[in-house]
Image (cartoon, helix red, strand yellow):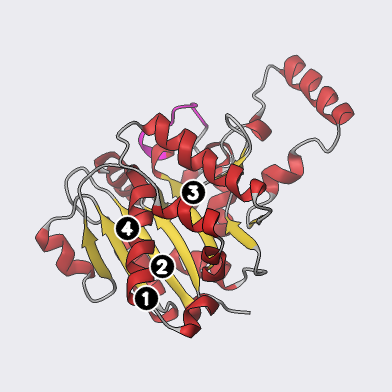
């Protein structure tokens, strides 16, 4: 079933120079015909840049605090205020943000159309075990009906204006998964490679730890999949993490970028990531 024509897309945008990246413009062009409504919530977007996307989305500009979660809050509140009707509860909300490079938007759309869903469920692309097990917030898809649960609704409406990234991670990135566990909302992950590679019992875990120690390799099954499984994610969804291209904090081997892009295109991608 295709849920997209019943879905509100809230896109949390930030760019240090107030620009809108070309990959995001292409994403909006691709997704516009398939979604009920698109809302861009930006903390920094120049006037001339707004004109590039005004025909694809409603644009909300806010002050720069609270990171992407506060933008999600602003978008959800806007939807709740504007869409007060009985049919609203049968709709869906997709939250995306600009921490991801959308390098193959048609591939991304195809995966969206394949999503399977149930009423008491949140869809994410990836689950990370970094710090603790949690869904990664660059992609969150859920039915509006979940907002009928006061705890779920209050999570979004009571997001505060923190400027500390670590506080945001603890309270909201990790806190959202903790909340869904607490109120028995299921989580479904569209990308499962890292989940399948995680040892299914204590004996397999012990064996894998020994093997990793012998080979002196990293426990990538416990790490952030947007870094260590970047190639699989790109092949399946057409996305790559901005931070991976810009900073590569874990020194992941990126040589296989040349399998998918020309040298000229890689330079463009690197420039886009660095300017963000």
Q: Secondary structure at mark 1?
A: strand
Out of 272 and 153, give the one closest to the viewer: 153
What residue appears at the point 32 percent right and 43 percent down from the top-left corner? 273
Q: Measure the alpha-carbon separation of dots 2 and 4.
A: 12 Å
Q: Secondary structure at mark 3?
A: loop
Q: Secondary structure at mark 2?
A: strand
Is 232 rendered above or below residue 251?
below
Q: Earlier in the sequence, mark 2 or mark 1?
A: 2
In x, y percent, where is residue 116? Answer: 66, 69
Question: In the rendered structure, are the residues bearing label 2 and label 1 in contact, judged by CB atoms less than 8 Å apart?
Answer: yes
Q: Which residue is mark 4?
A: 74
Magenta stretch in the rendered image: 245-252
What residue appears at the point 62 percent right and 68 percent down from the top-left corner? 115
Question: In the rendered structure, are the residues bearing label 1 and label 3 in contact, judged by CB atoms less than 8 Å apart?
Answer: no
Q: Measure the alpha-carbon separation of dots 1 and 4.
A: 15 Å
Is 222 rendered above or below residue 83?
above
Q: Which residue is mark 2?
A: 9
Q: Which residue is mark 3?
A: 137
Which quarter of the figure has residue 84? bottom left
Quarter of the C terminus within the rendering: top left
Question: In the rendered structure, are the residues bearing label 1 and label 4 in contact, judged by CB atoms less than 8 Å apart?
Answer: no
In x, y percent, where is residue 166? Answer: 41, 30
Q: Measure the alpha-carbon separation of dots 3 and 2.
A: 14 Å
Q: Earlier in the sequence, mark 3 or mark 2?
A: 2
For this orientation, the residue located farthest to the front is 150
């Amino acid at each position: 079933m295709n849920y997209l024509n019943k879905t509100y897309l809230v896109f949390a945008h930030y760019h240090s120079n107030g620009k809108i990246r070309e990959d995001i413009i292409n994403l909006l062009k691709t997704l516009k015909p398939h979604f009920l409504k698109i809302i861009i919530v930006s903390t920094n977007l120049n006037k001339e840049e707004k004109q590039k996307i005004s025909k694809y989305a409603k644009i909300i500009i806010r002050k720069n605090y609270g990171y992407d979660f506060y933008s999600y809050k602003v978008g959800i509140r806007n939807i709740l205020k504007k869409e007060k009707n009985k049919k609203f509860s049968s709709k869906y909300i997709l939250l995306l943000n600009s921490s991801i490079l959308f390098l193959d938007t048609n591939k991304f759309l195809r995966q969206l159309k394949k999503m399977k869903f149930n009423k008491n469920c949140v869809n994410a692309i990836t689950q990370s075990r970094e710090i603790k097990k949690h869904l990664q917030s660059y992609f969150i898809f859920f039915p509006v009906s979940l907002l009928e649960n006061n705890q779920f609704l209050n999570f979004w409406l009571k997001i505060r204006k923190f400027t500390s990234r670590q506080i945001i991670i603890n309270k909201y990135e990790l806190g959202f998964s903790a909340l869904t566990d607490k109120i028995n909302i299921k989580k479904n992950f569209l990308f499962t490679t890292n989940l399948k590679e995680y040892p299914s019992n204590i004996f397999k875990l012990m064996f894998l730890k020994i093997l990793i120690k012998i080979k002196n390799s990293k426990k990538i099954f416990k790490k952030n999949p947007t870094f260590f499984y970047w190639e699989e994610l790109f092949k399946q969804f057409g996305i790559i993490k901005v931070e991976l291209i810009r900073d590569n904090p874990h020194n992941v081997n990126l040589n296989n970028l040349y399998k998918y892009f020309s040298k000229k295109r890689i330079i463009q991608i690197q420039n886009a990531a660095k300017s963000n």
